Amino acid sequence: MTQSSPKAVVLLSGGLDSATVLAMALDQGYDCHVLSFDYGQRSQTELNAARAVVSALGVSAHKHKVVRLHLEDFGGSALTDHSIDVPEQDAEGEIPVTYVPARNTVFLSLALGWAEVLGARALFIGVNAVDYSGYPDCRPEFIAAFESMANLATKAGVSGQPFRIETPLMSLTKSDIIVEGQRLGLDYGLTVSCYQADDQGRACGVCDSCRLRAKGFADAGVEDPTRYQA
Amino acid sequence: MTQSSPKAVVLLSGGLDSATVLAMALDQGYDCHVLSFDYGQRSQTELNAARAVVSALGVSAHKHKVVRLHLEDFGGSALTDHSIDVPEQDAEGEIPVTYVPARNTVFLSLALGWAEVLGARALFIGVNAVDYSGYPDCRPEFIAAFESMANLATKAGVSGQPFRIETPLMSLTKSDIIVEGQRLGLDYGLTVSCYQADDQGRACGVCDSCRLRAKGFADAGVEDPTRYQA
């Protein structure tokens, strides 16, 4: 990275996908500013994972912002509303109850605000249409609509310096993603994907996210570094 | 309002415009859920005004949420960054330095999340293209783009129950807005529009927002109830 590297804002949850996106954005030469959200999810371990990933990838801590969002006030998701159980398996073809209302819209909006202040034009987000097709805000048509809206919403956009929403994982399978992260030297042992990881970041092994992740490592032929609960 | 009234989420800053929007949405028969943001602005008096307006218009306090947003972390606006002075007058045709990056995008995104949980389909926002043409995120083309995006982003949108972004002030002058609020019995003495109101909610009388507001009352032939600093 040189002084003249283009800036990017990268959304990072601490999970496998967004950690890979950060590694890819850095590999593409971006001066990465990393944005994570504390939005009342059950586990703080995801944020600890995000900090560990930022450090391991050599991004300065002062370029990593963790913004507290109070989405739990709104309820409506098993990830933020403690009265809804996280299911072991979601019904085929339905939108999962772990869907958080308007989550990616909110996250990208805040990333957009920061990007405008920084003078960044690229926003990276780890959405994926292959494995998570139940979430409407992970589809390419949503991303295209957000990008159009962003370029009407902002001083930068209307001044002819358009924002781009970069989704390098969109068409990759979980095993493709893992192979790419391995190539870039990312330590997936630092990442946490589990919806109900314990305080030490150990995964449950039974939720949708755990099963998808384990299958990804198996399909990629890569040893699974995930730490599981006993 | 009956049990079967359609629900709406109404964005309320505590200023003249959004207070009028709330009065209009109530007049249209909506069961209004009101959303305000504490986003590190200079003055807490705006939020006190929002609470007073909610109460005066007969909306139950439990339907009013004030969400803390940490936009000041991002800097970039005289309204959230204390190192930038609020100018007495903005240059003609330029985007004001009081522009907060992506503010309406962020506010509407959070309103969208709450609306989805509530089952509301109408989102009311007091944007206006007449008096505030310097802000890109107050234009009809931005609102239309946000609405399209919202209906791709959400479970509700993709299920064929589209959201509508309602902007009843879009084409009104400040004096039109004041006449409408008067008709609906709104007490504008409760509202605060000033960028640098004091702790008691008294306006400076010299900032852009104060001058526009005072001119609105004069043009409407309505006595100005604003309390000014000595």
Image (spheres, coloured by chain):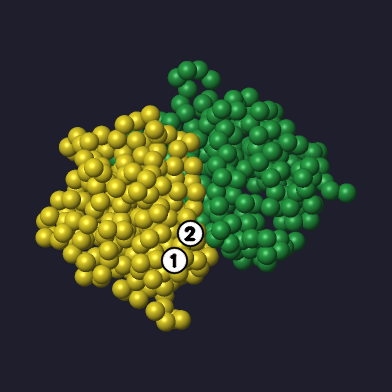
Chain colours: A yellow, B green
- Which residue is nearer to you in this view: B78 or B167? B78
- Residue under the image location 56 percent in, 58 percent down: B73
User: Do tags 1 and 2 sit on the same chain?
Assistant: yes
Q: Earlier in the sequence, mark 1 or mark 2?
A: 1
Q: Which label is found at residue A65?
A: 2
Instruction: Note whether residue B194 is visible.
Output: yes
Amino acid type, residue under disc 2 in the picture: Lys
- Which residue is nearer to you in this view: B152 or A175? A175
Residue sticking out furthest to the top: B2
**What is the x, y in percent for residue A169?**
25, 60
Q: Residues within 10 Å of mark 2 (few under 14, many from 20)?
A: some
The part of the image, by quadrant, that contains residue A109 is: bottom left
Give yes or no for contact between labels 1 and 2 (Cβ–Cβ under 8 Å): yes
Q: Is residue A140 above or below residue B44?
A: below
Amino acid type, residue under disc 1 in the picture: His
- Which residue is nearer to you in this view: B212 or A84? A84
**What is the x, y in percent for residue A131?**
20, 50
Q: Disc 1 sits on a residue from what chain?
A: A
Question: Horizontal placement of A206 versus B20: left or right?
Answer: left
- Residue under the image location 66 percent in, 41 percent down: B47
Q: Is residue A187 above or below residue B109?
A: below
Q: Residues within 10 Å of mark 1 (few under 14, many from 20)?
A: many
Q: Which residue is mark 1?
A: A33
**What is the x, y in percent for residue A79?**
36, 39
Cα distance in 3D space between marks 1 and 2: 8 Å
**What is the x, y in percent for residue B72?**
59, 57
Question: Horizontal placement of A21 versus A90: left or right?
Answer: right
Q: Is residue B100 above or below residue B21?
A: below
- Residue under the image location 16 percent in, 54 percent down: A216
- Residue under the image location 31 percent in, 63 percent down: A21
